[in-house]
């Protein structure tokens, strides 16, 4: 048997892009956080399976964490607006 088996080439990591998406999720729009979180999870699994270049593992993990933080901040912001928007509406109605 030949020692040179045909295997799929290892894909390049997307760590820098995922890190940028994670930062954008905190600064700008939580949609980037969802994308960063999902893509980073997929990439980390591919790295663990040996299908992707593991040199970007740190950047990918950082992008995932920032994406999670961006999503959490968005949820907290929405809850804040709903809570205090409701209180403002109640006070505008005279507490009825």
Image (cartoon, grey):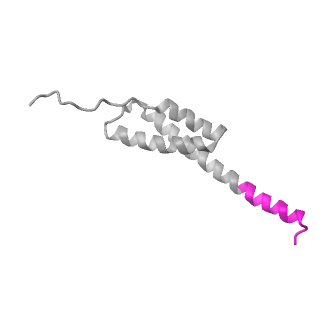
Residue visible at 60% across and 36% down in the picture: 23
Of the 4 image quadrants, the one containing the N terminus is top left
Q: Position of residue 22 (x, y in %)?
A: 56, 38
| Main secondary structure type of the part rendered in magenta | helix
To which quarter of the image does residue 67 belong? top right
What span is colored magenta in the figure? 80-96
Of the 4 image quadrants, the one containing the C terminus is bottom right
Residue visible at 30% across and 29% down in the picture: 9
Q: Is residue 55 above or below residue 87?
A: above
To which quarter of the image does residue 6 belong? top left
Give the side of residue 60 with respect to residue 20, left or right: left
Residue visible at 31% across and 36% down in the picture: 50
Q: Position of residue 49 (x, y in %)?
A: 31, 40
Front residue of this view, candidates 84 and 89: 89
Give the side of residue 65 with respect to residue 41, left or right: right
To which quarter of the image does residue 92 belong? bottom right
Give the side of residue 14 with respect to residue 82, left or right: left
| In magenta stretch: residue 21 | no
Q: Is residue 14 above or below residue 64?
A: above
């Amino acid at each position: 048997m030949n020692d040179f088996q045909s295997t799929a080439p290892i894909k390049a990591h997307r760590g820098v892009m995922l890190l940028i998406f994670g930062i954008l999720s905190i600064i700008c729009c939580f949609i980037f956080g969802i994308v960063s979180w999902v893509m980073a999870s997929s990439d980390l699994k591919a790295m663990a399976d040996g299908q992707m270049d593991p040199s970007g593992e740190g950047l990918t993990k950082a992008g995932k964490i920032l994406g999670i933080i961006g999503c959490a901040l968005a949820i907290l912001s929405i809850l804040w607006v709903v809570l205090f928007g409701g209180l403002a509406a109640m006070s505008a109605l005279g507490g009825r």
